């Protein structure tokens, strides 16, 4: 059993019509307890009005992402024993996003930027054409594969200080998606992608601090993708080719 019988959990409560205010709960402590377990216990046993978001509980969907002691994390994979400080933790909604209520952040701005970065496939063929064969070991394919496991949890977006200081910045997830498609041989419009990521709030707004890569739960490297876009846009500007 844990050394302490209870955890002191401070939860940020509020929303658009009420500024976030901390509320403290005493929660029973158990072995192998996750932060999502703690939040669920509060909602089920102390305050049923607590609002939060989760789905799979096994680190596949990313919907349970929250700020834990000031760090964006998947709460279903964050064990209390690894983050508590003296038997206490603080939980809040993801940073850099509007708050719907309590721990539930509004993801619309995040996905709007994903679209603004041309994060959608531009097909080279129709459904009536034969499927194009792609060399799985080609360098472009390796670059495309590097970020393909992004599940849009917004942890990198919430970790990014550039987003915090520049609301126009597209953010690491959207730019990583753009880099993935830019390197996909089946994408037909690289120039459109580069147009989207080279303007105001694009890849050149990144300060290369690397928080996106540091905190990505899937161990992806958005910073390298952004650097790739910087090189590609610079080469195009000076008349070169990728």
Image: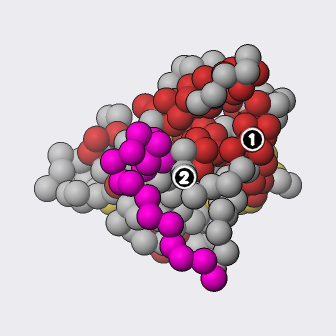
* Labels 2 and 1: the sequence-earlier one: 2
Q: Secondary structure at mark 2?
A: loop
Label 2: how many residues lie within 10 Å, few (<14), some (14-19) or many (20+)? some
The quadrant of the rendering that contains the N terminus is: bottom left
What's the image's color scheme? secondary structure
Query: Which residue is drawn at the image coordinates 63% and 18% (left, top)?
Result: 207
Measured as percent of width and height from the top left, residue 11 is found at: 56, 50
138 lies left or right of 197: left
Q: Which residue is mark 1?
A: 191
Measured as percent of width and height from the top left, residue 114 is found at: 70, 51
Query: Which residue is drawn at the image coordinates 44% and 48% (left, top)?
Result: 141
Distance in Å between CA atoms under marks 2 and 1: 13 Å
213 vs 134: above or below: above
What stretch of residues is rendered in magenta? 128-145
Q: Which residue is mark 2?
A: 185
236 vs 156: above or below: above
Q: Secondary structure at mark 1?
A: helix
Front position in the image: 40 or 162 = 162
Q: What residue occupies the far front of the structure in this picture? A: 130
Label 1: how many residues lie within 10 Å, few (<14), some (14-19) or many (20+)? few
Residue 34 visible, this orientation: yes
Question: Which SS type dominates the magenta stretch?
Answer: loop
């Amino acid at each position: 059993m844990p050394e302490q019988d209870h955890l002191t959990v401070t939860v940020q409560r509020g929303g658009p019509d009420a500024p976030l205010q901390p509320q403290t709960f005493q929660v029973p402590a158990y072995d192998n307890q996750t932060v999502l377990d703690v939040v669920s216990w509060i909602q089920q046993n102390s305050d049923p009005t607590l609002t939060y978001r989760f789905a799979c509980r096994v680190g596949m969907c990313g919907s349970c992402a929250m700020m834990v002691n000031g760090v964006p994390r998947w709460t279903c994979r964050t064990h209390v024993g690894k983050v508590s400080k003296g038997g206490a933790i603080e939980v809040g909604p993801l940073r850099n996003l509007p708050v719907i209520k309590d721990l539930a952040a509004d993801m619309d701005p995040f996905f709007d930027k994903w679209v603004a970065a041309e994060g959608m496939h531009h097909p080279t063929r129709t459904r009536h054409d034969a499927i194009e064969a792609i060399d799985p070991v080609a360098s472009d394919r390796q670059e495309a594969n590097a970020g393909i496991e992004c599940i849009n949890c917004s942890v990198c977006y919430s970790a990014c200080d550039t987003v915090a200081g520049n609301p126009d910045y597209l953010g690491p997830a959207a730019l990583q998606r753009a880099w993935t498609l830019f390197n996909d041989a089946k994408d037909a419009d690289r120039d459109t992608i580069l147009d989207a990521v080279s303007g105001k709030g694009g890849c050149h707004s990144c300060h290369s601090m690397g928080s996106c890569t540091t905190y990505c739960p899937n161990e992806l490297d958005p910073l390298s993708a952004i650097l790739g876009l910087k090189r590609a846009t610079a080469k195009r500007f000076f008349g070169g080719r990728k």
